[in-house]
C-alpha cells in the first residue's frame, strides 16, 4: 500500500468529492448518517460476504486437492472478511446510535451478522492455536464453509423476519433496485475501493507467508 | 525465595505467556458474546425485565467463560517434568500456587469486565459513575473468590486422570455462593444503587476464605 | 565438620500401597562424583526425586549439606535435571532460560547468550521449545543446569537422547563441575560411563542400594 500511496490518495480525494458534493442529499438522514450507512457500512458488509464465500470455495479446493496454497488464500480472505464484518457492525452501531438512539438492537439482521463475525473469529482462533498443522487447516476449512452457509441467512434475514433494519434495497427478490442512480454509482465506487483494499491486504499477507 | 517474590515470578510468567496464547484468551471473550446471544434468543427480555434478567445473564456468562480459562491455568505444569523442576527449585511452593491463583483471578476479572461492557452495550443499559464503582468492587471480590478457588483445586487435581472432567465437578458447586451473591448484589446496585448488604458480606467472607485457603494450603496442595 | 553433601536415613516411598523405596540409606560426601545404575523401573528416578525434594518421603529424613531438604534455602543448593523436558513448550529456548534465570540466578542477558552458544542452541534461541528435537531439548536442560550456582547436581539420565556432539557438550560440562568440586549424583544406564565416576551405586531392589565402586 505504501508503494501505491499516490493512487490511494487520488482515490480518497475522489471518494470524498463524490460523497460530499456529487451525491444527492437523503430525504430523512443528515450527511453523517448517509455516509455511514450507505458509503461505509454497505461496502464493508458486501466485502465480508464476498470474502467469506470465496474463502469457503478455496477451502473446498484445499480439502479436495490438499494443496496448502488454497488454504493460505482462504486464511487471508477470512482475515479480511473478519475485519470487514467488524467494521460493518461498528459502522452500523454508530449509525444506529445516531438514528435509533441505541447502539444495538436484537434484530435478525444484526444478530445473524454478529454470529457470522463470531464464526469468522473462531476460524482465526483455531488457526492461531493449531499453527500450520494439517489438522488446524482442515478444521479451519470446515469452519469457513459453515461461515459461508451463514451468509445467505444474514442477507435474507430482513425478508423472513420482522426487523428494524432496512430491507433489501439493491439485491431485491422482486423489482429493480430502490436507489438513486448517482448514489448507486458512488456506492459502487466505494465498494470498488474496499475490494482494492482487500486485494492489497490479501496480496501482502500471502507474500509475508511465502517469505516465512 | 520468599512467598511474594515467587508469586510475582509465576504471575509475570503467566502474563508473558498470554502473548503466546492470545488466541485462546480471545476465544473466552467471544464465548461470552455467544452466551449473551443464546440467552437473549432464549428469553427475549422486554426493557422492563432487564433489571431482573441482566445480573443473572452477566454472572452466569462470566463464570462459564472464566471457568474455561481457569481450567487451563495449570496446563503447562501438567507436564510432570516442569512441575518437578519448579518444586526442586528455590521457589516457594505456596508462592507457585498463589501466583497461579492470582493469575486465575486476573483472568476472571478481565473476562467479567468484558462481559459487563458487552452486555450493557448490547442491551443499551447505562449506569451512573457510582454504580460503576460499586460493580467494580463486586467484580474484584468475585474474581478473587473464583480465581483462587480454581487455583487451589487446579493444584490439587494435577496428575489426576480425567482432570478436565473432575475439576469442573469440584468447581461449579463451590462457585454457587459466588454466583448467588454476585447476582443479587448486582441487582441491588442497578436497582437501588446499594452495595452493602447481606449478600455483599457473604461474597466478602467467601473471597477472604478462598484467599486464606490458598495462602495456608497452597504449599500442601503441590506436595505429593 | 559435617562432610556430608547428601544424607538419607531409612527413607521410604510408597505409591498405591507399594513400596518403591523402602528403608534405604545413602550418604554422599561433598565433591563426590557418583553414578547410580539399576534395572528399568527399580526406583532410580524416585530416589533422585526424593533427594531433590520434589516429593516427600513416607518415612525417614533427608539432609542436604546438613539442612532438611524441604526448606526453600536448602533447595537453592541443588540443581536437579529430571528425565523429561522441564520447559514451557510455547516459549522459545531463550524465553525459557530468561524465566528460569529470574529465580535461579539473576545472570545478565549476555551470560544467557553465552550459555546458549555453549550448548549450540544460539541459532534456535527464538524457536518455540515444542519444535525442538529431543537432543535440542536435552541441551537446553544442560544450559538450565549451567545457569544454577548449586553445590549438588542431581542428574537423571542426562545422556539419554543425545548424539555424540551433545554427549561431548555434557562431558565437558561434567568435567567443569568436577573441577569446581561440586557433588554430582548421576543416574544412567549407559554402562560405558562408569569409569568417569569415583563411586558407583546400584539400586538392586526397593530396600537395597549396593556400592559397586
Image (cartoon, grey):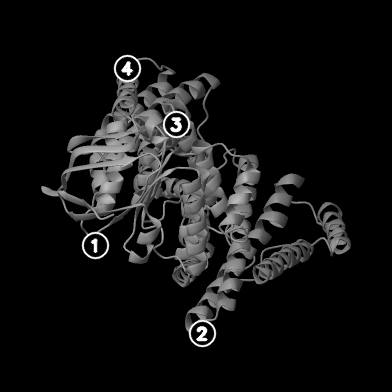
**Between C206 and A86, the one nearer to me in the picture:** C206
Chain of the residue under label 1: C
Chain of the residue under label 3: B
Label 1 and label 3 in one chain? no
Q: CA distance from mark 1 to mark 4?
A: 57 Å
Q: Is residue B40 left or right of residue B114?
A: left
Residue depicted at 37% across the width and 45% down the height: C32
Q: Is residue B153 visible?
A: no
Q: What residue is shown with label 3? A: B7
Q: Position of residue C42 (x, y in %)?
A: 20, 57
Q: CA distance from mark 3 to mark 4?
A: 27 Å
Q: What residue is shown with label 4? A: B201
**Between B56 and C95, the one nearer to me in the picture:** C95
Residue depicted at 83% across the width and 54% down the height: A16
Please state which of the two labelled residues, at mark 2 or mark 3, is closer to the viewer.
Answer: 3
Q: CA distance from mark 1 to mark 2?
A: 48 Å
In the image, is residue A92 above or below residue A174? above
Chain of the residue under label 4: B
Q: Is residue C193 left or right of residue B115?
A: left
* Label 2 crowd (10 A; few <14 / some 14-19 / many >=20): few
In the image, is residue B153 above or below residue B77? above
Q: Secondary structure at mark 2?
A: helix
Please state which of the two labelled residues, at mark 1 or mark 2, is closer to the viewer.
Answer: 1
* Label 4 crowd (10 A; few <14 / some 14-19 / many >=20): few
Q: Position of residue A154 (x, y in %)?
A: 51, 62
Q: Quadrant of the N terminus of chain B?
A: top left
Q: Secondary structure at mark 3?
A: helix
Q: CA distance from mark 1 to mark 3?
A: 37 Å
Q: What residue is shown with label 1? A: C40
Amino acid at each position: 500500500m505504501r508503494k501505491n500511496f499516490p493512487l490511494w490518495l487520488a482515490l480518497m480525494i475522489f471518494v470524498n468529492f463524490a460523497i460530499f458534493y456529487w451525491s444527492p442529499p437523503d430525504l430523512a438522514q443528515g450527511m453523517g448518517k448517509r455516509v455511514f450507512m450507505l458509503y461505509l457500512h454497505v461496502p464493508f458488509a458486501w466485502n465480508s460476504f464476498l470474502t467469506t464465500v470465496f474463502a469457503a470455495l478455496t477451502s473446498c479446493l484445499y480439502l479436495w486437492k490438499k494443496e496448502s496454497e488454497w488454504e493460505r488464500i482462504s486464511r487471508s480472505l477470512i482475515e479480511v472478511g473478519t475485519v470487514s464484518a467488524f467494521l460493518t457492525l461498528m459502522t452500523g452501531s454508530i449509525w444506529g446510535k445516531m438514528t435509533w438512539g441505541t447502539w444495538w438492537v436484537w434484530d435478525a439482521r444484526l444478530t445473524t451478522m454478529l454470529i457470522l463475525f463470531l464464526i469468522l473469529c473462531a476460524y482465526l482462533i483455531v488457526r492461531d492455536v493449531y499453527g500450520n498443522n494439517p489438522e488446524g487447516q482442515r478444521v479451519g476449512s470446515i469452519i469457513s464453509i459453515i461461515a459461508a452457509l451463514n451468509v445467505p441467512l444474514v442477507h435474507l434475514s430482513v425478508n423472513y423476519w420482522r426487523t428494524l433494519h432496512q430491507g433489501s434495497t439493491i439485491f431485491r427478490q422482486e423489482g429493480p433496485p430502490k436507489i438513486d442512480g448517482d448514489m448507486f454509482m458512488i456506492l459502487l465506487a466505494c465498494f470498488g475501493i474496499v475490494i482494492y483494499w482487500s486485494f492489497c491486504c490479501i496480496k501482502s499477507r500471502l507474500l509475508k507467508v511465502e517469505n516465512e | 525465595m520468599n512467598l511474594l517474590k515467587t508469586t510475582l515470578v509465576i504471575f509475570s510468567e503467566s502474563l508473558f505467556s498470554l502473548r503466546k496464547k492470545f488466541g485462546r484468551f480471545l476465544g473466552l471473550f467471544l464465548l461470552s458474546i455467544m452466551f449473551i446471544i443464546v440467552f437473549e434468543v432464549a428469553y427475549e427480555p422486554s426493557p422492563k425485565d432487564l433489571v431482573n434478567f441482566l445480573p443473572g445473564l452477566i454472572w452466569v456468562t462470566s463464570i462459564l467463560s472464566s471457568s474455561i480459562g481457569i481450567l487451563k491455568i495449570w496446563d503447562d505444569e501438567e507436564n510432570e517434568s516442569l512441575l518437578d523442576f519448579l518444586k526442586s527449585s528455590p521457589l516457594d511452593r505456596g508462592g507457585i500456587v498463589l501466583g497461579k491463583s492470582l493469575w486465575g483471578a486476573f483472568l476472571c476479572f478481565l473476562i467479567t469486565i468484558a462481559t459487563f461492557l458487552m452486555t450493557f452495550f448490547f442491551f443499551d443499559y447505562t449506569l451512573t459513575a457510582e454504580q460503576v464503582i460499586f460493580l467494580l468492587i463486586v467484580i474484584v471480590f468475585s474474581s478473587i473468590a473464583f480465581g483462587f478457588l480454581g487455583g487451589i483445586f487446579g493444584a490439587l487435581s494435577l496428575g489426576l486422570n480425567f482432570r478436565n472432567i473432575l475439576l469442573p465437578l469440584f468447581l461449579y458447586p463451590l462457585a454457587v455462593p459466588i454466583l448467588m451473591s454476585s447476582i443479587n448484589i448486582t441487582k441491588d446496585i442497578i436497582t437501588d444503587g446499594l452495595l452493602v448488604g447481606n449478600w455483599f458480606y457473604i461474597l466478602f467472607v467467601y473471597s477472604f476464605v478462598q484467599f486464606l485457603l490458598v495462602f495456608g494450603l497452597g504449599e500442601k496442595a503441590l506436595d505429593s | 565438620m559435617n562432610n556430608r553433601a547428601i544424607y538419607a536415613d531409612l527413607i521410604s516411598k510408597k505409591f498405591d500401597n507399594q513400596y518403591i523405596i523402602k528403608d534405604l540409606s545413602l550418604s554422599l560426601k561433598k565433591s563426590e562424583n557418583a553414578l547410580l545404575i539399576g534395572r528399568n523401573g527399580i526406583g532410580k528416578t524416585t530416589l533422585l526425586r526424593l533427594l531433590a525434594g520434589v516429593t516427600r518421603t513416607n518415612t525417614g529424613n533427608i539432609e542436604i549439606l546438613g539442612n532438611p531438604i524441604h526448606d526453600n534455602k536448602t533447595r537453592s543448593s541443588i540443581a536437579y535435571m529430571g528425565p523429561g523436558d522441564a520447559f514451557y513448550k510455547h516459549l522459545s529456548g531463550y524465553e525459557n532460560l530468561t524465566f528460569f534465570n529470574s529465580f535461579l540466578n539473576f545472570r545478565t542477558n549476555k551470560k544467557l547468550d553465552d550459555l546458549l552458544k555453549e550448548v549450540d542452541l544460539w541459532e534456535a534461541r527464538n524457536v518455540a521449545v515444542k519444535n525442538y528435537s529431543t537432543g535440542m531439548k536435552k541441551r537446553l536442560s544442560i544450559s538450565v543446569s549451567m545457569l544454577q550456582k548449586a553445590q549438588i547436581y542431581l542428574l537423571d539420565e542426562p545422556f539419554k537422547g543425545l548424539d555424540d556432539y551433545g554427549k561431548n557438550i555434557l562431558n565437558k560440562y561434567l568435567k567443569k563441575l568436577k573441577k569446581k568440586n561440586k557433588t554430582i549424583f548421576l543416574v544412567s544406564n549407559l554402562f560405558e560411563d562408569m569409569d568417569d565416576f569415583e563411586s558407583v551405586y546400584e539400586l538392586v531392589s526397593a530396600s537395597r542400594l549396593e556400592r559397586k565402586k
